Image: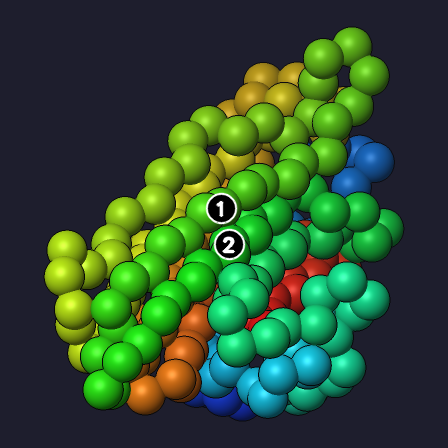
Amino acid sequence: MRRILTALLTTAAAVILVPGTASASPAEPTQSCGPIQLTGSLTLPEPGTVIRQSVSIGDDCQVVTGRAQVVAAPTGRTRLAAAPYHTYSEMYDCCGIVMSALYTDSTRTTSGGQVTSSSTTFSTRVNREPWNAGWSVRTATSSGGCASSCPSAVYDHHAEFSYQGIFDPTGDWYYNIHDSKVVLNGDGTATCQQTVNLRHTFIGWNWVHGCG
């Protein structure tokens, strides 16, 4: 029976979970949790700090949502007013290995409550296996910004990842999609909204996303 579970995460995060019964391979957990969508929105913290949130797939495919936490920025990532606004969306397997990830860095200048210029870049990360196997980037794009001064500059980043390797030689079972939206406002505030859509999930998988 198809079951859809919708839960409200802290900081306006939403979860849609559809349990299933298939298994990728004998080496994987015996219970597949089916396709899942996780969405979280976070507000840019004070300079020198980052905000992050962790969401995991617990027993019986239940979504376990961690609290959004504001912590000191890692060494080398202390953000000044003109420094890039960094976001990350990382999907971990049950062994704590990053399967797929999307990172963005965005900048802006403001005057009179308007964004006068802005830019963005993005990068991806995958876990590869020997013999040219593992996770691969299928597509990665970004769009948005303002042609002239505007109240808010909005950037959309999108990346899709597929897997073919030890746990699925067909390449048809796993597929992760990451989306990160960055909103840079003319008043100096900013928000990020991140979503992952996963074709199949298993108990112990963990999504970590954040901004800073």
Q: Is residue 85 above or below residue 97?
A: below
Quarter of the figure that contains the N terminus: bottom left
In the image, 96: left or right of 110?
Answer: right
In the image, 116: left or right of 37?
Answer: left
Disc 1 + disc 2, Cβ < 8 Å: yes
Check disc 2 and report the residue beneath it.
104
State the image coordinates of residue 130 (x, y, percent, origin top left). 82, 16
Residue 170: assigned label:
none
Q: Residue at point 53% right, 30% down?
A: 137
Check disc 1 and report the residue beneath it.
122
Mark 1 and mark 2: Cα distance apart in space:
4 Å
Front one among 98 and 69: 69
Front one among 191 and 174: 191
State the image coordinates of residue 128 (x, y, percent, origin top left). 74, 27
Q: Quadrant of residue 136?
A: top right
- Is disc 1 surrounded by few (<14), some (14 to 19) or many (20+) residues within 10 Å? some
